[in-house]
Image (tube, coloured by chain):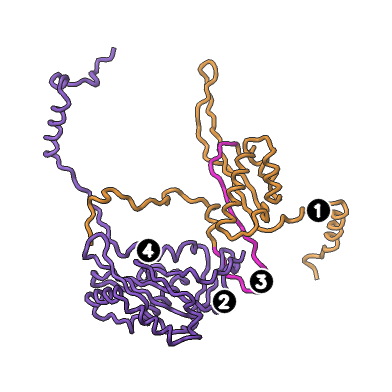
Amino acid sequence: WLASGSLFPLSCIHTSTSLEKIGKWEKKNRIVYPPQLPGEPRRPAEIYHCRRDIKYSKDKMWYLAKLIKGMSIDQALAQLEFNDKKGAKVIKEVLLEAQEIAVRNHNVEFKSNLHIAESVAGKGHYVKRIRYHGKGMFGIMNIVRCHYFVKLVEGPPPPPEPPRTGFDQAKEYVQQLRSRTLVNTL
Amino acid sequence: VRRKRRFSVPREDREVSPEEKEKRLRSLATAFPEERIERTFYLACTADIIDPYVPPEGDARLTSLSKDGLKQKMEKLKQTAASQLALRKIKDHDLDFSTKTFPEKAQEIFIEAHNCLANFNKQKLHSLVTERCYPEMVRGNRYKTIRWSFVESLEPPRVVQVRCDSIVNRGNLYGQVTVRMHTRQILAIYDRFGRLMYGGEQVPKDVLEYVVFERYLVNPYGTWRMHGKIVPEWAPPKDPIVK
């Protein structure tokens, strides 16, 4: 039962970041699955990571996100390192961060055993500013920002889908013809 | 031309020496006394284990060979002067304390605390475990599933050391008791995705532990709570985490 007025006059104990809204993608890292029975196949680990308000256009970011989509993480990092766009540097940092988080917090054994299941670019907060033209004319311009979301899954990347050939299309057409039935009759 | 007067010092104060300024400010301080912002805090537990017990080497292994000799040595250790002094101080404050009944209660507290850990019952855990021990127990467990169960006690628990200490002020007594427990437990930790990370559900393990319990003696409503564990240097290494 001590009175410590002189020791800590203004010590604030509550320093949490609960005032900012936590996005949906960050909350996906918080779900806990029930323990698996010994007979079930091992569930692959999924790690969600994102970066908010990157100063880049979402349309330009989309090209990079689509480039990376089905690759393994090593291949993705290699491609981004030698890509000339500004967003490539940012995405590379995000992927490295996500890899680090996976190994440290989510019980992933090999850092290169991850592949990119989903990679999406979304619109960030836009700010309106005035763009000055000649003769006293002005335009309203948008300062454009984007978010980048990535989902890493443990395991080798899934094999790419074989392209649809004419033979496949023909087979499907014949199947459709065969599955026709007479409706509203006896 | 802007006509508002800014940053002008009154004529009396323009050529005043710094000592006179100080004198004037000091005379004003008595008119507005500083309010002391008092924020009290309450220390419910000590920060560390006082005088950690050094368990003799080969404690759990040699008992089968020379039972009687070791038992005598154990009892002699318990009767060291410091432990006796501390025991007397504790009995002054807490009349019901006895080295014979306490180990069972200690074991019950131990089992309940671990059950609360497994069920994530934080309120009850706070009442069974001191503030120093709580973060050690709970760190890293938020997104994991823990399954723990107590099978049996291989040897009856025994009080091994008693210490009493006061922090900050002289009469502020905290008592610490080290209890030696040799038990069989089952522990299984599953990570976020339900994969087994450590231990096994059907694998009971023999565990020799030296658990320290603490109580704030001066507080009449204080309770004995788990304060920490002493890990001896000769303890066998733990199993690696399965990934």
Q: Which mark is residue A44?
A: none
- Image quadrant assignment for residue B74: bottom left
- Judge depth for marks 3 and 2 and give the one in front: 2
Q: Residues within 10 Å of mark 1 (few under 14, many from 20)?
A: few
Q: Position of residue B223 (x, y in %)?
A: 30, 73
What's the residue at 43%, 83% (across, down)? B70
Q: Quadrant of the C terminus of chain B?
A: bottom right
According to the image, label 3 marks what residue? A40
Q: Nearer the viewer, residue B1 or A70?
A: A70
Chain identity for the colour purple used in the image: B
Label 2: chain letter: B
- Judge depth for marks 1 and 2 and give the one in front: 2
**Pointers 4 and 3 in contact (C-beta within 8 Å):** no
Q: Main secondary structure of the magenta part?
A: loop
Q: Is disc 1 in the same subunit as disc 4?
A: no
Mark 3 and mark 1 lie on one chain; the one further toward the N terminus is: 3
Label 3: chain letter: A
Mark 4 and mark 2 lie on one chain; the one further toward the N terminus is: 4
According to the image, label 4 marks what residue? B132
**Magenta-drawn segment:** A32-56
Q: Is residue A34 visible?
A: no
Residue A128 drawn above or below residue B193: above
Q: Amino acid at mark 2?
A: Glu
Q: Does B45 sit left or right of B189 as displayed?
A: left
Separation of residues labelled 4 and 3 (CA atoms):
39 Å
Separation of residues labelled 1 and 4 (CA atoms):
59 Å
- Judge depth for marks 4 and 3 and give the one in front: 4
Separation of residues labelled 3 and 1 (CA atoms):
30 Å
Q: Does A75 sit left or right of B185 as displayed?
A: right
